[in-house]
Image (cartoon, rainbow, N blue to C red):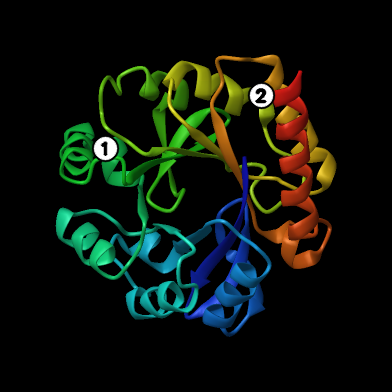
């Protein structure tokens, strides 16, 4: 299981939001390229980048910056979300070296778009499911839908996705711990890899997630995204990844 550093981009800066609110952003760096390089040097096995401006605008707004970040981290895979709402945009990002793309809003509103994109780029598309009280939210989390995340994944069928990124909006940026129960339940329902997001605070949160995965053999949690915790240092990235590695090794021996 990977611990995945998050770098959220807003107006060219590295920020973290609270519960997805653009008017509640904390700037952690004015140099996202240096920040990407930093996490790569810390041993990150992949990076999670979100173009927040793009998510709200519905089109990429930090593409040049993203390309510089991808180049800066070399062989470390980058998964990117925010404003990916056409095959042309996806193609351009893949050509720029992005490993996986996260699609949310248009994928939820037009499931046929998700299917077509995944068929064109098999196992390179991550479905981004962001939920508030279990109900899906889109358009930069501004709009809440009448369908739940669990209901949505039941209809995925044989879509050749790379996995799902599941975020509990109410916990995102709040350092209150992951919604482990909902994440594991979604993973079991979907039957594909899920990356947990929203609320990672301390090493104990990672241990709780690992224990829940062990307790539910049908779950498939491949990683956990962390943002504010590693910037405010309530969690040290290297220690977090080392803990997950130890827990996985322990569980494999039992």
- Going from N to C along the chain, the mark reached first, 1 or 2, is 1
CA–CA distance in space, label 1 to label 2: 30 Å
Closest to the observer, 134 or 34: 34
Tag of residue 16: none
For mark 2, give the secondary structure.
helix
Res 152 quadrant in image: top left
Say which residue label 2 marks: 213
**Location of residue 173 by image quarter:** bottom right
17 or 102, which lies in front? 102
For discs 1 and 2, the disc positioned in front in the rendered view: 2
Image quadrant holding the C terminus, namely top right
Q: Does residue 24 appear in the picture of this structure?
A: no
Residue picked out by circle 1: 109
Residue beneath the point at 23% across and 58% down: 90
Residue 65 rendering spot, x and y as whole percentages: 41, 79
What number of labels is visible? 2
- Would residue 158 be found to the left or right of residue 240 on screen? left
Q: Which residue is depicted at the point 60% across and 23% down?
A: 184
| Rendering coords of residue 199 (x, y %) | 70, 45
Q: Is residue 198 left or right of residue 47?
A: right
Q: Is residue 122 above or below residue 51?
A: above
Q: x%, y% of residue 36? A: 56, 73
Residue at point 74%, 61% (across, down): 230
């Amino acid at each position: 299981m990977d611990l995945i550093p998050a770098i959220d981009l807003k107006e060219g800066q590295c920020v973290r939001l609270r519960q997805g609110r653009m008017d509640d952003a904390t700037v952690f760096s004015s140099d996202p390229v240096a920040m990407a390089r930093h996490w790569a040097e810390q041993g990150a096995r992949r990076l999670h980048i979100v173009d927040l401006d793009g998510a709200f605008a519905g089109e990429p707004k930090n593409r040049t910056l993203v390309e510089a970040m991808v180049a800066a981290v070399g062989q470390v895979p980058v998964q990117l979300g925010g404003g990916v709402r056409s095959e042309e945009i996806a193609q351009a990002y893949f050509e720029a070296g992005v490993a996986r793309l996260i699609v949310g809003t248009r994928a939820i509103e037009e499931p046929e778009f998700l299917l077509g994109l995944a068929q064109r780029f098999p196992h390179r598309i991550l479905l981004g499911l962001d939920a508030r009280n279990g109900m899906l939210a889109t358009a930069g989390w501004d709009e809440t839908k009448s369908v739940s995340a669990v209901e949505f994944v039941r209809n995925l069928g044989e879509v050749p996705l790379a996995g799902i990124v599941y975020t509990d909006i109410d916990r995102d940026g709040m350092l209150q711990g992951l919604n482990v129960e909902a994440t594991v339940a979604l993973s079991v329902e979907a039957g594909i890899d899920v990356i947990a997001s929203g609320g990672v605070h301390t090493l104990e949160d990672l241990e709780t997630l690992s224990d829940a995965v062990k307790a539910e053999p049908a779950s498939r949690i491949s990683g956990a995204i962390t943002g504010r915790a590693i910037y405010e240092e309530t969690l040290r990235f290297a220690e977090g990844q080392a803990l997950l590695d130890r827990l996985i090794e322990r569980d494999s021996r039992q």
